Image (tube, coloured by chain):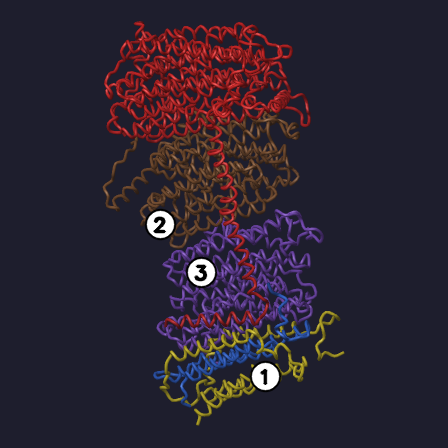
Amino acid sequence: MNVPSEHLLVLAAILFSIGAAGFFLRRNVIVVLMCVEIMLNAANLSFLAASRMHALKAGATGPSLEGPTFAIFVIVVAAIEAAVGLALVIALYRNRQTVSLDALTDLKD
Amino acid sequence: MNQAIVDRILSAQTLLATGPFLALALGVLLLVLVETIPFLDRLRPVVFLASLAAAAWAATRTMTGPALWVFEDTYVANSTTSWWSVLFVASTLIAWIFGKRYYREEARFQGEHDILLLTAASGLVLMAGARDLLVFFVGLETLSVPLYALCAFRRARRDSVEAGMKYFVLGAFAAAIFLMGAALMYAGTGTLTLSTMQARGELLESPLALAGAALLLASLFFKISVFPFHLWVPDVYQGAPSPVTTFMAIGTKAGAFAFLLPMALLLPTRSAGLIAAIALLTIAVGNLAALVQTDLKRLLAYSGIAHAGTMLLAIAGDLNGDPQTGAASQAILFYMAAYTFTAGGAFGLVTMLEAQTGRPVTIESIRGLQWRRPGVAAALALFMLSLGGIPATGGFLGKYLVFSVAVRAEMVPAAVIGILLSVVALGYYLRVVVAMFMQPEVEGRPVPSESRVLPAAMALVCAAMVLVLGVLPGWFLENVR
Amino acid sequence: MADALFYVMAIGAVLASLGVVLAKNPMQCVLSLLASFFALATIYLLCGFQFLAAAQILVYAGAILVLFLFVIMLLNLGNPGTEDPTDVRMFSRANAGIMVVVAAALLFVTALAARRAGHLPIGREMPEEGLDPIPGLASEMFGRYLLPFEAISVLLLATAVAVLVLAKRDRRPGNSAPLPGDGP
Amino acid sequence: MLQQAPLIPAGGAAYDWLWLIPALPLAASLVAGILHFLTLRSRGEWKRKPGAHGHDAHGGGGHAADHQYSESEQLPGAVRVADHDAGHGHAKVPAGIGALGAWVAALSMYAAFALSVKAFLILRDLPAAGRVLRSSTYAWIDTGTFPIDIAMHLDPLSSVMTLVVTGIGALIFTYAAGYMKGDPGYAKFFSYLALFGFAMLMLVLSSSLIGLFIGWEGVGLCSYLLIGFWYEKGWPADAGQKAFVMNRIGDASFLLGSFLLAQLYGSLDMAAINAGVPGSISSHATELFVAGLLLFGGACGKSAQIPLFTWLPDAMAGPTPVSALIHAATMVTAGIYLVVRLNPLFAASPMLLAIIGIVAALTAFVAGSTALVQRDIKKVLAYSTVSQLGFMFLGLASGAWAAAIFHLVTHAFFKALLFLGAGSVIHGMSDEQDMHKMGGLRRHMPVTFVTFLAGAAALSGLPLLSGFFSKDEILAHTFGNGQAGSPLYFALWGVGILTAAMTAFYTWRMVALTFYGKERFDPAKVHVHESPPVMTVPLMVLAVLAVGGGVLGLPVVFALPHLLGEWLEPVTASGTAILQSAHGAHEISHMTEWLLLGLGALIALVFAHRGFHRYRDGIASDVRAVETRPRTTAFLMDAWTVDTKYTSFIVGPIKLLAFVIAVVVDAFAIDGLVNGVAAATRGTGSRVRRMADGSIATYGLWMGAVTAVMAFLFLWKS
Amino acid sequence: MLNLTNLVFLPLVGALLVAATPSKAVGLQRGLTLLVTLVTAWIGLALCLDFDGSTAAVQFAESARWFTLPGQIDVHYRLGMDGISVLLVGLTALLGPIVVLSTWGHIHQRVKEFMVWLLVMQTGMLGTFLSLDLVLFYFFWEVSLVPLYFILGIWGGERRLYATIKFFLYTLAGSFVMLIGVIWLIWTAGTTDVMRLMDVAGRLPIDTQTWLFAAFALSFAIKVPVMPFHTWLPDAHTEAPTSGSVILAGVLLKMGTYGLLRFGLSMFPGAAIEAAPWMMALGVIGIVYGALLSMAQTDVKRLIACSSVSHLGYVVVGLFALTQAGLRGSLLQMVNHGLSTGLLFLLVGMLYERRHTRALDQFGGIAAVMPVFALFLVFAVLSSAGLPGLNGFVGEYLILLGTFQASPWLAAIAVTGVIFGAVYLLMATRKMLFGPLVHSENRALTDLGAREIALMVPIVVMCVWIGVQPNAFLSRTDGSLRDVQSRIDRARAVRTASLGEIPVHRLEPEAR
């Protein structure tokens, strides 16, 4: 594949922004979590794109493995966050029978 | 497994360097063990404290002597990180001791609570030692994830769950920003390790790296809670169980600063102005908003925001070229140490009062406190003065050191503005003192007058530390480099 | 051919992600997300990251999304008509515009960075074993990044504890409302 | 600084007893003060149990007086004065141990007089050029650039002053011992009086301008305390306050003058200044003029000259012996003393002398005209005093230093006599001061009457009495200055003559109204009586002095020595020399002098006669004057309305300014700004807190937005 | 025993002792506090008597390394007495027992706490005057705020909370700005030793000097307080308990003027010369303004407080006249103001204890029922109004003389303060003491008791002593003030040279 790496980066940026937009717009906690997952994926894509970029540039001696390693960690962390997040959702639902973030305004100035 | 790798990893040096983290991690494992085996749960406090003690001891081993760079420079143990580790241990201890007998319904989950707290502490240690974005990220998550759960720990309560949820959602967002930033840094420089990045100095000026640095900085700002990344802080601090709030106030901030310091070296010099502006805005917003608070936890939350801004000023100064290398780090460490004991003590006493009365502690509710609890009132007053930076307390010298960084870096106008804004802070600190000492006791539902031994002792220790740091800082200043 | 597939997949990922943001029913969101993950996995593969592609499918699609699905089902949120009304009206919110603008700004900034970085030519052939050789990853994971690896294992343990605390049903009645899935 | 060897005569321990002259009254003052408190204690006023409403002499007296005051309110003009001395007549209490106070004070004064005489005798035996006694020096203030040292400096001038002060003082102390009998603050009164003696002696004996200032302000203080002695009535306290403040205005001027002199001569020793002046006339004329003017400003305050004269009539609120001693004989003459003491300085600037002359003539005329219509006997005397002080300054303005001192001395004699006589009258009339309610007293109080006549004759300048010589000497000098080429002085002389005429008129009006005619009071109610010997003996002594005092300074044409002039010659020589070098020596011819003497005698006799005859049968003239020329009478009655104008144009605006500053500037503007900053801070706080609206979306939005901005800023400049 | 460490920290030790007493043992607390302050006073006065004023050298110096700041700048615990501090130390030491004695009458609640704060305050104030290390000075400077804050806030009047917060924040704002100045100066000069700083700082570029001077002067100006920054003072004084007012007026405000002298003039003579016209103008405005303000007051305590603005205006003018006479006068006037205004506050407090009001129109004629009180009040008023022979005159005269040497016109305006001072003080005296006893409550007033008289006698004695023999005090300041003068003269010469002018010899007295 000869796609230049910056196209990958731009794609990652687009995905990140879509995720962020979703984060701002959606009220449903579960959907917001999904949007965060999109953002994490975008980050992962950037890591990989960067890794590819460094690995394939002239004069590189081998693969740049920090990116993929980080990506693996990110996947794990994403799983952890999803688990905790969803547990929180359950606790929240028990509390108030809703999963809307707009309901979370008891604490404010 | 590759023998070379094993050799490399299990060297004495590595163990020495990662000692504090290992001690805490081991503590977590042991706690889980203790929790699962029926008859051992009495050992829980022992394990917990032993783990902390071991971590502290391990940290003292690296306090002097040369810096230990391990794992291909992704992790370091030097004097500063060791001090940070000691501070983290202290923070954990403060939060834990003041949290004794705080929980009622959730008391049966005390084991889980301790596990999560210790995990978070281990995350802090990792963050302070990290010199690699990946390591730091994992440390950050190791800190954050348990905290998300801890915030919502009183899960039957609306405010607790709300706090946990808010912290989690925003924390996840910040984590995503961090990752994107790290990825861009990596794209720009081809590495995740700070020392290597610094070695490739010119690449730091590449657009990708700059954008990445901005995003990284933003996510760190979220953790240290500076304007406008601070908005979650009051809500979460108020809603979270008070022991957790205590830990967050003094722990999280310290961890983020511990990494921000080496991280700041990667930032372009011209960002000093931006950072200084953010710092000043933070001081302003924190103090101004605190001025109109009535809930003590919220008030202290905003005060903490202002303090974060003050410390950020030192970083701005460092970036702008403080001729005294290492002074910013020392200043922030000292400031944070003072803040740990001061805010730790203050939050801790609030925790204690809340536990005793079962109600949120407000300025109204502590009116005339000195009649019933003179010791508590006196200690709280001392903490307030220290937070305000009055001499003879650690807060003063911290302020002195931080502002001297700014002054040396020729940011005098910023320093003047900053210090004038911190005059505002005394407005609300004094309100607390006024309520306790100068107003009549509140009618009905008074604070019980009997004291609890452990929190009282801890408060005494905090107060003593505040005074020692304020009056006899010599030893500390000489040993923290 | 590979290039074309990349762009197709890229467009697919974008569309699927938009689907997550725009779909009204959480169930549709999950499905869109799944599509997005698959598209990304394909791209990883195209770029030479075989292991990551596999992990993406296995962990993300296989584990995480199932978790999401599970919770949605548990809370009975998947049925039509149970959508959060505030969530549905998201675009009618006054500051929705600002939100989109902010997201666009983020995009702009990142894209600007990529743009300013200039053309990044490919100077080398893709190696045979791809860009994420398993031995290499392993040596990174267990060598250089052993410490975070350990930490994350502790974290996983702690997560289990955390989830346990948070989601455990309270035995005492009246303390918290039952979930729709809780038995009588 | 002007450098020349200052001719300060060396002092020595041999004359350290000079310190005793002021120190004795000071000690007496302390003793009397202690006696006062002992009296209070024995009376049980001090150390009362809380809540005990026992008999309260002070308070009771005050209330009675207050009551009386309100009754007499309908009487215009005489209102403030009608019951001046009322306080002491009521609620008489035994003085107890305090009775010793009077004798302690009087003894100290007699002792001081004795020492003064001793000093005079020593001085007389010295050669004229070296007639200075100087004690060793006390280093008072080290200013860092020059020291302010004080020594007791006794030269002919201060010798005259000490004799007058201690002599007349001793007499008045004696008189007061009788006059104040029964007053609850008996010992206190003598404590104040003795303190005054100290201050006045300090004033005349000090070698340093600032040492003089100690006395200068000290006498002001005593004046304040003594005017307000019957403070329960309120307005005496007001009058005292007014006196102090007006004196302070002068003092401020005095201080500035002293700074300038210190700047010029690097010393405040008056001998040094006098020695330095001749050398700096040409080079520092302006400075000398300004310094002189500023000092004269001080003198105006103390000696009640325009524009600072309005306090003196009010000062009559004090007990009459006080008026006699302080407000007639001694304190008010301090200004004259100052000018003579620094005569070279004043002589150095003709312009300054002209200004002094104008002020003096104006004062003399305004005060004299005011005295014409007063009904209160003490007010007549008060305005007369102001007028006579004007005369003295007129003499100074003409360079007649010795003549001014001569008039000072004779005036001290006869005015003290008149005041004491008036006091005796008031005493005998049970505190009545309105002459319209007197009349025919010569039958009731023969001794007082006779002595009063002597004083009146001297004051009005009837030939061969003391006032005649001293006044005419001043007028002659003024006329002589006019002849010497300053036409202004002819005008001043004219005013002087006019004033002399008025003086004769009002003096004899007073005599007539008080002692002649029918009794305008009810003898059944008012038991008129002659005063006891302790009061009348001093009157007699003073009467002798008033009659015979003229021998001290007989006119040149009498071909007898001018004793005082010769005595003072060492002091005045320098000033006179400066004047002569400016105008050349000038002597008026004998012919002119005879003419002037004759004119003076004629005017005195004619106007004395007119004043006496118009009023010897009663008050009809006054009533007629009020009816026919009400506005003029009111104008004169109110002393040309100067005081009223001060109240409305100076005091009022200052009070208004103070109010504006306190309310508008301070409370509203400055403090408002401070509180405004605080309020604005809180307001901003309230607005800032609204950022935290609890919504995650908002928080996230802020984060995202600022992240984008930060990234943009980072990239922008790259 | 007779050393500065004992002097400074004895009260603190006493505070700890008092804190350890049982809270009901009021008598013990009072006695102990009195004892401690008496011993402190003895040490302080003995040291002041031992002090040799002929040299500018620091005496009784003590020094020990405290800690090290970044840049290897050693901060020392450095105490020492010189001619600038000697009088103020004496004043502080003297007022200590007097204030404690005065509390018998008005502090009946929470006595222990009060005594503790009083003693802490004493340490703070003595430390401020005796520190010869900039950091140590700042330390004491701010620490001394705290006790007064509590004293005002707990034992104050009705609006005490407003007053106390205003006082604290206002002065703190100044102090914090000064902190920046302190930091800057220490960094630039590389030392914290005040004596060395005096040499180093004076050689800094004039711009730096000016900024530093501004930072320091602002703080001191607020503390003094100089005219536009004064509004905290009347509020604080009005609300403070008597003893608080006495300390505030007697000593605390002097910290401001002391600071101006030591850290303003001595340290930055160049900048001080530049600023002198402005500061003098402010001082003169303060004199007149404060006097007029006092005239309009109806609350007698507020009146005295406003008069402080006027009196301290003199001190500021005298300092910035930059002449020997001005400096001496100012230094002496600091003490004078402490004595006479302290006396006034004591008296007003005693009256308040009896009558529970401070409104002028509630009095009148009380001289009749309280003759001893009247005697003391009149004495205090005269001392305050600057009657020759009493302390106030010497200070005022020297200040005005010094001002005249620097600027005759300003002196001419300043001298009106002499008049106005008499006006408002006598007006207040008139309204309180004289006139008829209108209010029946006043008839029952009891005169001062033995304790009250005893505690005022030392002040009276000092007032007379200073008035009669000022040289005994001035001579102790001689060496140091000549040193300050020489610094100023040098800076002036430098300035003249830099302006390219030939120094003009003005008509100015020379030292003999």
Q: Circle 1 — which element?
A: loop
**Splitting the image into 4 quarters, where does residue D339 fall?**
top left
Give SS at disc 2.
Answer: helix
Q: Is residue E384 visible?
A: no
Crowding at mark 3 (Cα within 10 Å: few <14, some 14-19, many 20+)? many
Q: Who is closer to the viewer here, E147 or D238?
A: D238
Instruction: Tell me what hue chain B is rendered in.
Output: purple
Of badges 3 and 1, nearer the viewer stands 1
Residue underneath mark 3: B313
Q: Which mark is residue E189?
A: 2
Q: Colour of chain D?
A: red
Residue B423 drawn at (x, y percent):
50, 53
Look at the image and give the colour of chain E: brown
Q: Colour of chain C?
A: yellow
The disc at residue C23 is: 1
D236 vs B33, left or right, is left
Residue nearer the viewer, B19 or E12:
E12
Which of the pair E375/B344 is nearer the observer?
E375
Give me the disc on residue D285. none
Q: Quadrant of the C terminus of chain B?
A: bottom left
Task: Give the alpha-carbon distance from disc 1 to disc 2, as whole Å.
Answer: 67 Å
Chain under callout 3:
B
Question: Which chain appears blue?
Answer: A
